[in-house]
Amino acid sequence: MSASPIVAERLAAPAATARLHLRLLEGQESIDHVLFNEGDVFRMAPAERRRVSLQLVREAATRYHELCAPYRRLCEADGFSPADLVTSDDLARVPLVPAGAFKRHSLACGDGRAVVKRCVSSGTQGTRSEVPRDNVTLERFVGSVQSIANDVVGLPFRGRVLNLGPDTDEAADLWFAYVMSVLELIYPAQHFVRGGVFDAAGLAAALEAAEPDERLLLVGPPPLFFRFAEYLQERGPRFGLDSAGADCVVVTAGGWKRASAEAIEPCELRARLCEALGLEEPARVRDAFNMVELNTVLIECEAHRKHAPPWLVATSRDPRSLAALPDGETGVLAYLDPTPTSYPGFVLSEDFGSVSEAPCPCGRTAPTVSIERRIKRIESRGCALKMDHSICVQKEAA
Amino acid sequence: MMRISNEALDVATQRFVLAPDPGEHVVGMLQRAEETPPDAPIVILPPTYGRSMRDYAAVSWFLLGNGFRVVRFDNRCHVGESHGDIYDYSPRTAIADLEAVVAFVRAQLAGAPWALAAFSLGWRWALRCLRDARDLSLLFGIVGVVDMRTTLFHVMEDDWFALHAEGRLPAEGHPLGYLVSSRFLVDSVELGVHDLDGTRRDLERCHFPAVQVIGEADPWVPVMEVEEAFGRSGRHRGRRTVLVLPGVQHELQKNPTAAAMALEQMVISCHEHLYGAAPDEVVAPSLPELVRFKKSGRPTPASAAAA
């Protein structure tokens, strides 16, 4: 970062400040300014957003190419160099690591000594992914969760988290549970899964004990919220959080996973939770999306659309050619996330969905990502394994 | 210069309860890492507005992990474990609490030097409390408020001091989400801690060095006002240093990179002034270690009851 003209001018005139020693600290990378210091990142003008995305992805691509040998091999196989990133149209050329590759390969940047947490997926479809995160990567994740939550959900200075999940000890390396539990770094938190058992009665008691003007953030996976709603309705009488004056926001995250047989539509889940908790507006219930390979969380706005922040480039890809698809067209979702420093954050997901820049009723200008369904194994063979193969073959040749 | 540690820091904690006024308790804790000598220098961390001692886990870790003993506490009439409700928050009790804690610390020093590091409004109360101290080695500020009028204007989006001067001050308000009696503002004016001129005068009479880290883009604590308070007059008795974080705003907890830089500077300054030289490296906690450390400091029901 260069010094701002104002500060540089004062540094050049120390006599004006007598014995004062005024010094500008260096060291913050531009990505941190976008993550933590910008105003409302979801309302950037599209041209500015593309400029920011291009710069951050280019910086990250250079790092991954230099420090992650498997990613470099992937680039070489695709005939791609980070220097090729000149305009935002070039972003579609950035090689993508299939999410499945994290199940089979160690994809660390450098020697891995800086890794402080090996984060694993839930392994719903079998093998677990393992993603190595260093401290910078983890801090950027937690910091961006906070800034995104502030911008999209409006979380205030003061609040309390009620987590329908375990605490950090019990969450261990399981990424989704860990993400929920580290919210206690930001807000005071209580956790309602102990020894793998959900304490619905304890959560109900915590809600009943809330102070009238208290801001509560309930987070957890949809199946536990579904069970909690059932518990409240069976128990009676009806909760009335809104009428009691509590300011409550519910954020579901993590999907239905092994409980997919019980899954209900998002709008039905919202309606059930509003009914059970006594919330008057469905906008009080939001869904969030993340996967272990992604270092950014996507949280629904008031209109229940998931906006991508400017540092994250989301696209949908043709399943066979991996070419970027037009606005709103369904394909395999791909993410260029430049925030990880310890692994390549350019990932081809295992989800079908679409990305759109169409105006959102909430007024935010950032593109929206719609996640429609998981790719079935048979479908994934057409694309994901192709690139995984190039990583493996090149590795053996090297 | 900064090394991230993913290892658990073993810390010995001594909780204490003081009574600045009869029947009103102040709860705090004195901590040191197991490997730190019991007579190591002490750094006091007073709370700022809206924060309790439990919110200072990261700041404490940086100091504990780099060879200092740390004292943190909760103000009376504020959030946390000490006496009273935040509705009655006032600089009078905050300053009296710090006076009591300083007396406690002086009894624990065993010849060691001491310093104080404070954030935001907590720094302003600390400056008033300590302006005549002769044994303080360093006053370290992070986004310390130099003109409460400017800060409050941005927080409340209204000039409460003008309303006070016009006799139209509301009885209470909601700064940062807490319902607080406007008595705190009246007390600030009576004590002369509400404006830039008062800060400048308090700083000028301090014999100890004062270092302040500020955000270049912080509207609550503008760079120009900090410069004014810290040096323009040339009448200061101690050395003054202001370190500017480019592009950074007031709430450092939202910016882990900037926060780490500020805390690294805190450790360096404390080493320079309490140990006589800058450290070879600054050890910082990894995020998982910070989560573990913060959890380990949670008050248990028994400790809360004892307090």
Image: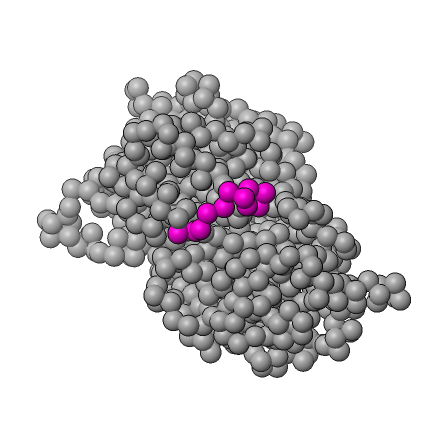
**Residue B91 pos. (x, y %):** 29, 39
Apparent side of residue A121 relative to residue B300 in the rendered image (left or right): right
Point out the image quarter for the C terminus of chain B: top left
User: Is-magenta flag for residue A259?
Assistant: yes
Between A98 and A53, the residue placed more toward the observer is A98
Residue at 28 percent of width and 46 percent of height: A280
Q: Quadrant of residue B150?
A: bottom left
B301 up-or-down from A32: above or below: above
For this orientation, the residue located farthest to the right is A397
Q: Which residues are magenta?
A: A257-267
Of residues A193 and A49, which is closer to you in this image?
A193
Of A121 and A137, the residue lying toward us: A121
Q: Residue A209 at x, y = what percent?
A: 34, 29
Q: Residue at x 60, y 38 (%)?
A: A171
Quarter occupied by residue B64? top right
Q: Nearer the viewer, residue A104 or A153?
A: A104
- Left or right, B279 with respect to A71, comes to left
